[in-house]
Image (cartoon, grey):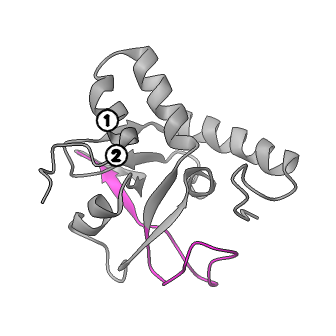
Amino acid sequence: MTDESEPYNELERMIAESGDDRERKSKALETLVNSKVYVILNKQWDGQGQPPSGTSMMFVTDGSDTERAMLAIFTSRERAEAFEPRGDGYDFQTEVDAAWAFLGVPVDCGAYVNPNSIVNFRIGPEMATFIKDVVNREVVAHQGKAPSGQSIQ
């Protein structure tokens, strides 16, 4: 079994090594947005095509700021499976394009990459909105698909 503090993949290594270095954080964020990630859903879905009606992604709070909702994004299946505590009914880890996940971030919410893990990364509401706007422009440019080809309409 791998030590939870050790990165499971290249993206996690980038996050762990970014520290307070703005350039490294920027590169890690760019890599994240263009990666496959795991989200925890309230309904089973294989990550292909459209999710079932009523499917929602799990949100967590931003540490001590219990008023700020953050989309929980995981950089590996292991981190998604190990996450506790989960909201009621959020039992399904699903691999998706990170770009698709960001489309589900509401205004004034952010994203928390690997919450409750040593290898984590917070994305504030302003940056999450910026990413969502960029992804929306990409969707239009790619006729309803993420650059990877996943349908995200």
Start-end of magenta stretch: 40-63
Location of residue 58 with respect to 112 vertically, above or below: below
Q: Residue at x 55, y 52 (%)?
A: 98
Instruction: Work out how far the residue at label 2 is from the one at label 1, CA to CA, in angstroms.
Output: 6 Å
Which residue is located at x 69 percent, y 53 percent? 148
Circles 2 and 1 in contact, beta carbons < 8 Å: yes
Residue labelled with disc 1: 13
Q: Quadrant of residue 121?
A: top left
**Which structural element holds mark 2?**
loop
| Residue type, label 1 | Arg
Instruction: Indicate yes or no whether the magenta region holds residue 34.
Output: no
Confirm whether the magenta stretch covers residue 50.
Answer: yes
Q: Position of residue 70 (x, y in %)?
A: 41, 51
Q: Main secondary structure of the magenta part?
A: loop
Q: Is residue 118 above or below residue 90?
A: above
Q: What percent of the width, then of the height, locates residue 134?
A: 71, 38
Q: Residues within 10 Å of mark 1 (few under 14, many from 20)?
A: some
Q: Toward the viewer: 34 or 140? A: 34
Return the x and y of residue 126 as percentages of the image width and height.
55, 34
Q: Is residue 89 left or right of residue 153?
A: left
Q: Decide which of 55, 97 is in the foreground and name it.
A: 97
Judging by the rendered image, the residue that carries numbered circle 2 is 9
Residue type at numbered disc 2: Asn
